[in-house]
Image (cartoon, rainbow, N blue to C red):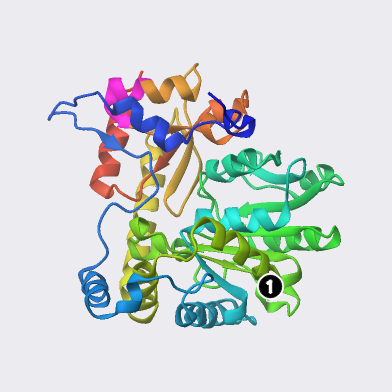
Amino acid sequence: MILNPNMAATRPSPVVEAKRWIADKTFSPDLPLLNVSQAAPVDPPPLALREAMADVALTLPAAHVYGPVLGLPSLREALAARFSQAYGGPITPGNVAITQGCNQAFCAALSTLAGPGDEVILPTPWYFNHQMWLSLSGVRTVPLPTGDELLPTVAEAEARLTDRTRAIVLVTPNNPAGVEYPADLVHAFADLARANGLALILDETYRDFDSRPSAPHDLFSDPAWSDTLIQLYSFSKAYRLTGHRVGALVASPERLVSVEKFLDTVAICPSQLGQHAALWGLMNLDQWLAGERAEILARRGAIEEGFVKLPDWHLSGAGAYFAYVRHPFDESSGTLARRMVDDIAVLALPGSMFTPEGDPSGAAHLRIAFANIDTTGIATLMDRLATLS
C-alpha cells in the first residue's frame, strides 16, 4: 500500500484509539462505564436553539447551498463585535473567518505559516490534534516543557527558537491540562513572537468556561495585534454544536486571503446550518451560557475537592473541561488507562497521548474530561479511583 510517509509517522487520534479499548466490552449494570475520555458536550443544544435551526432548515433555501468561503457576513460581524467588546480592542468582520470547527481553524492558520521542514513550538502536554496536523504537514513539532505548574516560560521558548521557527502555539484554558494562562504570560509570549517575526497562535476554544470574570488577556487592545496574533475559537463547546462543526479564526485581513485558499480547497464553505445556529446563539443564549459556565466551574470545584481526599493522587491542573492528574502507580499511564477500563470501568486518556514518546511526565499523568459527568458522577469517579490498586 502506498502511504504518505508523514501520515505513516503520525500517531492515531487518542480519542479514536481509546474507543477501540471499549468496542467489544460489556459492562455490568452494577459498574457501568464512566467515560471521561472526550472533551465534547454529549447533550443536544438547548431546545430553543434546535427550534431556530429547524426553522432555518425549513424556511431559508440559502442554508442548503454553498455560502461564502470565509463564512456568513452576519456571523463574522456579530463575532467581531462580541470579541471587540470582550477584549477591549479593535476587531472587524474583516479579521474573522468562520471554519468547519476549531480544528480546521488551526489547520488553516498553520497552512499559511509553515511548510515541510519548518518548526512550530508546542507546550507539553499538547493538544494532540495540533501535533497531529504538524506531523501530517511535515512540520517539526518543537516540544516546550511546562514544569510542575504546567505553564510554559518565555525563556524556555526563546532557547528553542531557530531560523526555521514559524509560530508558537498556546491553548488557554488548556487542553489537556486545564490551566488558565495568566494574562502577563500570554502578553510576554506575544512580545517574544513579535520580536522574532513569528506568529502567536492562541487557541481559546474553552474561553467561555474560563473562571476569570474579565478578559483573559489584553492582546487585542494593541492596535497592531494582527501583525503577530492569530486567535482560534469554537462555537461547538459554547452551544453544544459539535456535530455541526463551527469554529472561527481571527487574524489580519491579509492573512485571511491565504486562509480563504485553504478553506476553499478543503471544505468550500462552513456548514450553513451550523453558522445560523452559532449566530442565533450569540444573539440569544448569553444567560443560558452563563449557566453552563457556572455548572462547569462547579464541577471543577468538585474535582478539586475530590482529589484532596485521594492523597496518593496529585491534581496538577484543573479548568474548563479538564483535570490533569499525576497517578501513584509504578506503571506508565498508557498501561494504567487500559487497566482502569477492566478494573474500575473508567475510560480516561493517558498523559502519554499528549506528550512526545518517552516523556516521563506524560507517563505519570492522566487526563480526565469532566464536562460530561455531573457532581454525582465525579463522586463516583473518586470512589472508583480510591479502589484502584
Q: Secondary structure at mark 1?
A: loop
For badge 1, the amino acid type reads Ser
Q: Nearer the viewer, residue 315 or 107?
A: 107
Residue at 63% over, 27% down:
359
Query: Residue 281: where, in percent of width, then height?
Result: 35, 74
The residue under label 1 is 252
Q: Is residue 319 above or below residue 98?
A: above
Residue at 62% over, 59% down:
202
Query: Residue 278: where, in percent of width, then height?
Result: 38, 71
Magenta-span inclusion, residue 361:
no
223 horizontally vs 15: left or right: right
Span highlighted in magenta in the image: 339-346
Query: Residue 323: where, in percent of width, then height?
Result: 45, 43
Q: Is residue 316 above or below residue 154?
A: above
29 horizontally vs 233: left or right: left
- The chief SS type of the magenta part is helix
Instruction: Name which quarter of the figure residue 381 lies in.
Output: top left
Instruction: Name which quarter of the figure residue 229 lies in.
Output: bottom right
Quadrant into which the C terminus falls: top left
Query: Residue 59: where, in percent of width, then height?
Result: 24, 80
Q: Nearer the viewer, residue 162 or 4?
A: 4
275 horizontally vs 114: left or right: left
Q: Nearer the viewer, residue 203 or 277?
A: 277
Residue at 60% over, 82% down:
92
Residue 203 appears in the figure: no
Residue 61 appears in the figure: yes
